[in-house]
Image (cartoon, grey):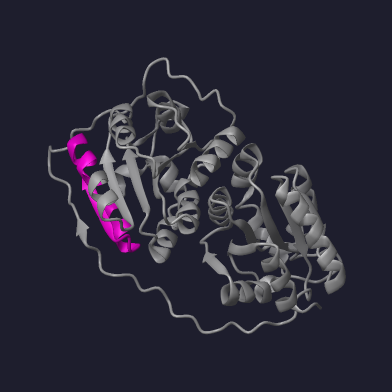
Amino acid sequence: MMDTAQFGSLLKELGFDFYSGVPCSYLKSLINFAINECEFIMANNEGDAVAIAAGASIGGKKSVVLMQNSGLTNAVSPLTSLIHPFRIPILGFVSLRGEPGFPDEPQHELMGQITPEMLNLMQIKWDYLSSNIDDAKQQIQWANQCIEQNQPYFFIVKKGTFAPVTLQDKQLNEQKAIQAIKREKVFDDEKPSRYEALQVISALRDDNTIHLATTGKLGRELYDVEDTPNNFYMVGSMGCISSIGLGLALVRREKAIIALDGDGALLMRMGNLATNGYYSPNNLLHILLDNHIHDSTGGQFTVSPNVDFVDTAAACKYEQSIYVHTLAELSEYIKEWKQHQKLTFLYMKIAEGSKKGLGRPTIKPFEVKERLQVFLDD
């Protein structure tokens, strides 16, 4: 069992001071250290944690994710379709519940057998973390070299690795009451095409604004409207765009971060609305363009007609949650947010379908990330 505070301090010295994750009893001491001494974002599932850490990494922070190995399954999509193609370096710690030869609960038995194989299949370099602090120091130095080469690195953590750390009392973030909620007006929705909505959004860009586009037709259409270094076209990792936005907004508070979402994507990971509301970065604007269908896969329906997204975002403590009826209103609310920033959710119904003959970005995902990082640091 190693001194957790000493180990955590070593990580801090190497620049790892941004954490996100979901608790596990095997990792509780390192989690407690991170909450006490670093910036720790409590995610609602492990895939969100990976995306939050990815956003922070894009923003220039060395980022750490923490999870139980059962939750590694929740993180497969962003690990394979976000971290890998964009070459985003994150440091991961995953516990080894169900370690072969040691009794554990039945739900952990299979994951204990396949955790190393899963990391291998995802082409993630990893090692078992030693409980000896001197050995662990050497392991962390090697992991840091991989991180600095834009490669993720994970440690598998066995039971009893970390010595206890007491969690300090923290004041919870109790957010202010919602400032404005706009209700739907009957027959008042303009329902423009997504392309028309993106033209309005793109026309309002400036040198301080980052546009993060969810996977599928939305990102492809934004690329077609105007390809610029401050656009980020997320591929895969469906549902993760506001998590990336949260991580980026928290570490680059001087920038205006606009996360552009779709109904199918948001429904897939609605838990991050609560995370966004809890941490409530003023510089994050979350826009949902809802056409009630999975447009990129052939127009199959979503269940979004049954969901009141405006009330849901408000209940999650977005400081503003607004129903947008027209393109003119969309422009007005974006301009207003840029002048008086606060965590804001804009909801707009759009027409089904997409631009005919729509192409795909020709720039590679890691090139999109790299040029955005250059833009952020200019």
Query: What's the magenta region?
Result: 310-333
Question: In what quadrant of the picture does the N terminus appear?
Answer: bottom right
In this picture, residue 334 sits left or right of residue 20? left
Query: Where residue 47 sits: x, y (%)?
Result: 57, 53
In this picture, residue 19 sits left or right of residue 192? right
The residue positioned farthest toward the top in the image shown: 357
The residue positioned farthest toward the front in the image shown: 378
In this picture, residue 24 sits left or right of residue 326? right
Which residue: 18% across, 52% down? Answer: 182
Query: Where residue 24 sits: x, y (%)?
Result: 65, 69
Q: Is residue 144 above or below residue 294?
A: below
Question: Looking at the rendering, which quadrant does residue 97 occupy?
Answer: bottom right
Asked if residue 157 is among those painted magenta in the image, a careful observer would answer no
Which residue: 43% across, 77% down? Answer: 172
Q: Is residue 326 above or below residue 24?
A: above
Which residue: 77% across, 79% down? Answer: 3
Which residue: 65% across, 74% down? Answer: 28
Question: Looking at the rendering, which quadrant does residue 342 occupy?
Answer: bottom left
Query: Where residue 61 sits: x, y (%)?
Result: 59, 56
Query: Where residue 82 sits: x, y (%)?
Result: 59, 42
On the question of residue 146 being in view, the answer is yes
Asked if residue 321 is among those painted magenta in the image, a careful observer would answer yes
* Residue nearer the viewer, 72 or 277: 277
